[in-house]
Image (tube, rainbow, N blue to C red):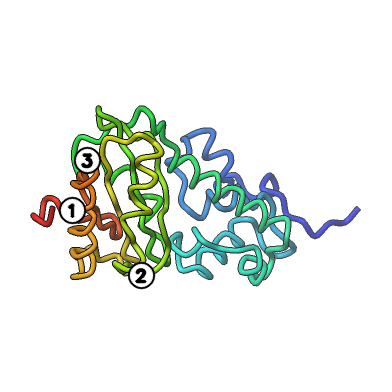
Amino acid sequence: MKTDTILIRDVPKDERPRERLIQSGPRALSNQELIAILIGSGTKGNSALSLATRVLKHFEGLSLLRDATITELKMINGIGTAKAVQLLAGIELGKRIQSYKLSDQYTIRSPEDGANFLMEDMRGLKQEHFVCLYLDTKNRIIHRQTIFIGSLNSSIVHPREVYKEAIKRSAASIICAHNHPSGDPSPSNEDIHVTRRLVESGKMIGIELLDHLVIGDHKYISLKEKGYL
């Protein structure tokens, strides 16, 4: 029976990403080849590698692909619902593996430790997220919570919401963090004002704010290191 589907096994050997992965490992594959494996098969006149190229071109690389939707993927010629679902499943699994950490065993010893814990989750967010890490007496993370989403503002980031969870979790200390969607972690005056307000509130109830991290794109700034705590 005639079919319009082109399987990877029908592609010349030197263009077979699955075989290359088996022989050389996943690190040896390009982004295009990895996406082709997720796509699985091409369509009439288009191999899986060709479709993978279209996907990367449509999203201008991996950065925007990270937040792709099924509707956006289906706008690409050759990508239907099934292929879009396969791609999204692969992307989501990658996100979860990257962000998975044993929080109760993760100890914060430095601002870099806190930034490393949060960086992959927060650096690509399109809105500002204000997140708190609640620590025990040994500086191990016992809980993480997003307090609010939106532009940082002292009237919104109320100490009550931050420390309510700390009391509930019997936290000994807190590290706060928020991202700058621009990728530039330089703190604003509002960032500094919010930090100082949280520090004073923490002193009143005996729960120390250890740091406030501003997360950019693969870079961060510690307001403690800058002398604002």
Q: Amino acid at mark 2?
A: Ser
Image height of 9 relative to 44, above or below = above
- Label 3, secondary structure: give it: loop
Mark 2 vs mark 3: which is more N-terminal? Answer: 2
Instruction: Please indicate whether residue 28 sits to the left or right of residue 172 in the image.
Output: right
Mark 1 vs mark 3: which is more N-terminal? Answer: 1
- Label 1, secondary structure: give it: helix
Q: Residues within 10 Å of mark 2 (few under 14, many from 20)?
A: some
Which residue does the image show at 36% across and 57% down from the upper left?
A: 130
Q: Nearer the viewer, residue 158 or 109?
A: 158
Q: Amino acid at mark 1?
A: Glu
- Label 2, secondary structure: give it: loop
Instruction: Please indicate whether residue 37 sits to the left or right of residue 28 in the image.
Output: right
Residue tagged by mark 2? 151
Q: Position of residue 220 (x, y in %)?
A: 23, 55
Q: Nearer the viewer, residue 75 or 6?
A: 75
The CA span between labels 1 and 3 is 10 Å
Residue tagged by mark 1? 200
Residue tagged by mark 3? 206
Q: Position of residue 46 (x, y in %)?
A: 67, 63
Residue mark closest to the camera, 2 vs 3: 3
The CA span between labels 2 and 3 is 28 Å
The quarter of the displayed image where residue 154 is located:
bottom left
Q: Amino acid at mark 3?
A: Gly
The CA span between labels 1 and 2 is 22 Å
Q: Position of residue 134 (x, y in %)?
A: 33, 40
Mark 1 vs mark 2: which is more N-terminal? Answer: 2
Q: Residues within 10 Å of mark 1 (few under 14, many from 20)?
A: some
Whether label 1 touches label 3, CB < 8 Å: no
